[in-house]
Structure formats: C-alpha cells, structure tokens
Amino acid sequence: MAIDVSEAIQHLMQDRGMSRELILQTIEKTLVAAYKRRYGNLENAVVRFKNDREVSIYAKKKIVDSVYDPLSEIEVEEALELNSEAEIGDEILIEIDPTKFDRGAVQSAKQTARQSIREIQKDTLYSEYKEKIGEIIIGYYQREQNGMIYVDLGKLEGTLPKKFQSPREVYHTNDRIKALIVDVEKNEKSAGIKVTLSRTHTEFVRAIFEVEVPEIYDKTVEIHKIVREPGYRTKMAVYSNQKDVDPVGACVGLKGVRIQTVIKELEGEKIDVLKYEVDPRKFIINALSPAEVRDVIILDENKRQALAVVNESQLSLAIGKQGLNVKLANRLVDWNIDVKTDSQVAQMDIKAESRRAVSELFGDEISRVSELPGVDKTVVAILLEHKIDYIEDFISLSAEELAAIGALTTEQLDTLRKLIDEYVEIIEEEEEDAPAQGADKPAGPDSPALSEAEESEEYECPECGAKITLEMTKCPLCGIGLSFEYEEE
C-alpha cells in the first residue's frame, strides 16, 4: 500500500527549511524504524519512492522450498503467485501495509522522525553559519545574563560575550546589534548551535569598511593592517593599487561621510586612517598621526628601534592619553618607537648611538672596505683588483696612487670617504721626534718616566668608559680628546 507524502514534504520544506533529499531520507528512516518495531530488528526492510510523492515499504524475503523463518523466507509456491518467474534461491519483495503497524511501532517511528529532523536542522544551520564566520550579521537584543548578551538572529540565538563587547555600548530590549561572527559550534546538549559574536575584533572594523567603501570591497584600496583599542581608538593603514586613487581619501569619503558612518557604528570610537609606506621612517610618521612628527631617526634597524622627534606642543598628542597613541603606532608599524622633543634629543648623542648600533650589526670593529654598511660592491671589487682590502690601505694611498686607479670616479671616491668618516674612527699616531708642546705634556714613548709595560697599559675613557691606551689622542668611541699627565711620586 503506497502512502501519499507530498503534503508532508512541502510542509517540512517550507517550515523547517529542509531539502527534499533530506526529507526523503527522514521518511525512509521513519518507516524502517516502524517495521523493526513491528517485526523485530531485521535488516530486510526496503523503502521505495514513486515520483517523490508516494512511498511504499517492502519486506525482502528469500524463496525456499521449506520455510523455517516466515519473516525472512517465503515458499516457492507462494512466490510464484506473486511472480511467475520466481525460483528457489531468489529474493522477492513483499509489500507491507503500514496501517497494520501497532501503536508501539507508530510511536517509535514518530520519535525517530523527530530526532532525524532535529539532527538535520542542526547540521543545516551549522553548515550555513560556519560559512559566515568573518562576516557581519544583524540581530536584536533579547536578554543579558552574567554579562553575556543573547541576540536574536532569526533562525537561532547568538551570544555576545562580555570580552567581545565595547565599553562604550549599552543595550536595551529589541535594540539592533550589528556584530561579527567569530565562531560556530554544535551544542551537543540541545538541538541548536552556538554562534559567538564580537564587536571588538579588528576584523569587525575591516568588514564595516568593506561595506561602506566600494574601493576596499573591489580591492582597489587594500588594508595593510588594523590595530585597535576597542571603545577608544583604531589605527588603520591602507594603500592603493592604482596611482590615481587616494587610499585615505577613499576611506574618509567626501566631507568625511564614509568615516563618520563607521565612527557612528562604533559608538564614537576614534579612527585614524593613514597611508601605508614601505619606508619605515615615513610609515612611523604616518602612524603617529594626528601628531606632527618632524623627523624619525633609526637607532637600531636590527632590533627595530626608532626615535620620533616632535615639537614640544606635539609631544602629548603623539604619546596620547595613557600612551595609547604611541602604543597603537608601535603595534601598527611593528617598531619600538620612542618619542622625544627637540630639547630632549639635543641632550642625546644620536651619532654615537647610531655608530654603536652599526658596530653591533657588523661586529666590534670595521677594518675592511667591504664591511662598510651601504658600500658600493663595484668599488669594493675594483679595490680588490688593486690589492686594496683594508680601510687602512685605502687611507694611506696618495692622490697619485688613487688617480692611477682609473676605474673609480671622483664621486665614488667621495662617497667611500664619507662612509669611512661616518663609521670608522681614524686615530692618527704622533711622530716620535715631535713631542707635544705645552705645560701639560702627554706621556708618550719619549717620556723617560714610562716603561714599555706602562705604554701598553689600558685605561678607561672618563666620558663613555671605552678602553683606551696611552698612545691615543682621542677616544675611538665617543671622540673626546685625550690628554695624559705623568705625576711624580
């Protein structure tokens, strides 16, 4: 006996949002469960659909000469009445009338159907919302419990944990909430799924800009990085893939219309949109906006340490309230930025610090021309051809000897000399027959009061603490002039 299930299929498709294939699978499981409850836990039930409208259930039985199990076997004479071509050993389908199922079988079938529908709904919703992770969704405030806000999303209920709520925001019943889907999990204890929302993630800001700025959506303008202190300030670095498109202007919009929409959505949170630069100096200057930075000095490129110089009036703006502006700038450019005023920088020996950083990068002492940072490799190769490897050898060359190296231009020689002046401390030795004049006569090799052991003795520079010897006239590290006095006991 066939059962018309077309009405049930339409009802489940409309009210439950289930696909036709899943509905047919549910009906099949339901009939098989009823059959097993009525005839025992047998695996010979077969369900057949006709045009997705009518369904029938059959018992598959084996044709035998003598029946021992009437539930799974049928005699050949009875089988021939159903099919004239039946033979012993074949299998035949015997249609079962579902109306003969007892009450227990029907109840078992209903329970199986409900459970199957719940599982199908859970899997369908899980697949649907799993694909939406990273997207914005709109819901409505329902209730709050222990700091957790429950949001009505239509088909299900989402949760907005306390840690993902902006400190600026306060909600009331039925308030509209726009949030980012950050996680979707199956709830094993119920038929639903758990959707976690957030309004504090940086990706939430990115998603809002993608909606408000068409240039970001179509990749004409791209976001390099976003850093955020939720509820207080956001910094976003952008760049353009087309020369004629201003990335910052596109995000701000005409008269600030676009950026104001984003600020309104974030409940008044400050947003700094700045241009990304490959040059770290320019990028740091942009990152410290809205403060005006006069200059940026790279102290240690290897350790990514930089010094930003600002006017006295811009210092508090560059640092920000509780240091928030410079902290966000550090995270945005991934550099350790120290902000100083002109007067503070004047008290620092920037050149000595830079030279120390280079010394750490290339070793304790630069002796070869090839070790100079930024040196032209072509110049190094030409000097090596003339057997000039060490800086000392180059400095000792006369004008005639340099002119003999015809492959080097005057510009190349001047650039090399500037590098040597910047990174190498040149110590000129005094001639033995020309002792220093004056009342404070420095002790040297001609002094009768000094022995050879005393000449090689090492001392410390009174200014920077570097190691110095008696034959030095100035400190190799800080450059201060040195003078040694011999005191008779």
Image (tube, helix red, strand yellow):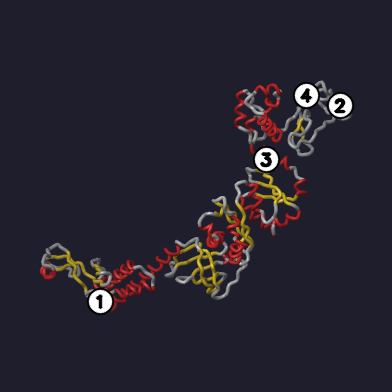
* Mark positioned earlier in the residue sequence (4 or 1): 1
Residue under the point 82% across and 20% down: 433
Q: Nearer the viewer, mark 4 or mark 2?
A: 2
> Could you tell which of marks 2 and 1 lies nearer the N-terminus?
1
Residue type at numbered disc 2: Gln
Tag 1: residue type?
Phe
Which residue is most to the front? 244
Residue that carries the numbered disc 2 in the rendered image? 437
Of all residues shown, which one is farthest toward the right? 439
- Mark with earlier residue (4, 2): 2
Q: Is residue 337 above or below residue 117?
A: above
- Residue 213 lies left or right of residue 16; in this view the side is right
Give whichever of discs 3 and 4 has the lower sequence position: 3
In the picture, measured across the screen, residue 20 lies left or right of residue 462, that is left
Q: Secondary structure at mark 2?
A: loop
Label 1 crowd bin: few (<14), some (14–19), many (20+), radius 10 Å:
some
Sooner in the amino-acid sequence: mark 3 or mark 1: 1
CA gap between label 2 and label 1 equals 126 Å
At mark 3, the secondary structure is helix
Q: CA distance from mark 3 to mark 1?
A: 89 Å
Which label is found at residue 357?
3
Q: Which mark is residue 101?
A: 1
* Element marked by disc 4: helix
| Residue in the picture at 63% in, 36% down | 374
Relative image position of residue 209 (x, y in whole percent): 55, 60
Q: Quadrant of the C terminus?
A: top right
